Image (spheres, helix red, strand yellow):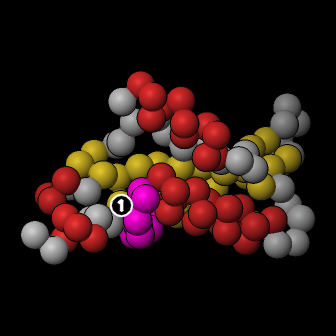
Amino acid sequence: MKSALLVIPFLAGCGLMPTDTALATTEGSSRIYSITSLYDGETGSKDRASAAMDVDAINLCRSGYTLLSEESRPIMNGIGEVTSSRLIWEIKCDPKPEAASQ
């Protein structure tokens, strides 16, 4: 498992910071992960962050995934202005095709 933990930051790219462990395991051994990315207030920045997270979720699961929840949390500076936001996805990895056929 340690070697997999070292690979995740390289898969991340563009500010994505996936967790180093699964949050939970569902019936059928599917894993649930929380992944995050930062975005600013520019037009389309949330869409770009979502697109990058989609690629990273597929790479993390090595198959498809199901988006369980999406949350945006503002990041504020010392005087209370929002400087950027953190996009947080909770995903569940779909069963691998060979595991689903058994």
Taking 9 as reference, is 38 left or right? Answer: right
**How many numbered markers are drawn?**
1
x and y percentages locating residue 50 in the rendered image: 65, 66
Q: Is residue 90 above or below residue 22?
A: below
Residue under label 1: 93
x and y percentages locating residue 34 in the rendered image: 46, 49
Q: Can residue 92 be seen here? A: yes
Name the quadrant containing residue 41: bottom right
x and y percentages locating residue 20 in the rendered image: 46, 34
Residue drawn at 14 percent across, 58 percent down: 27
Residue drawn at 63 percent across, 46 percent down: 12
Taking 43 as reference, is 65 left or right? Answer: left
- The single residue placed furthest to the top in the displayed view is 2
The one nearer the camera, 75 or 12, is 12
Question: Quick one: SS at disc 1?
Answer: strand
Taking 58 as reference, is 101 left or right? Answer: left
Magenta-colored span: 61-69
Could you tell me the amino acid type at mark 1?
Answer: Cys
Residue drawn at 80 percent across, 50 percent down: 84
- The single residue placed furthest to the front in the displayed view is 98
Taking 53 as reference, is 21 left or right? Answer: left
Quadrant in the picture for the C terminus: bottom left
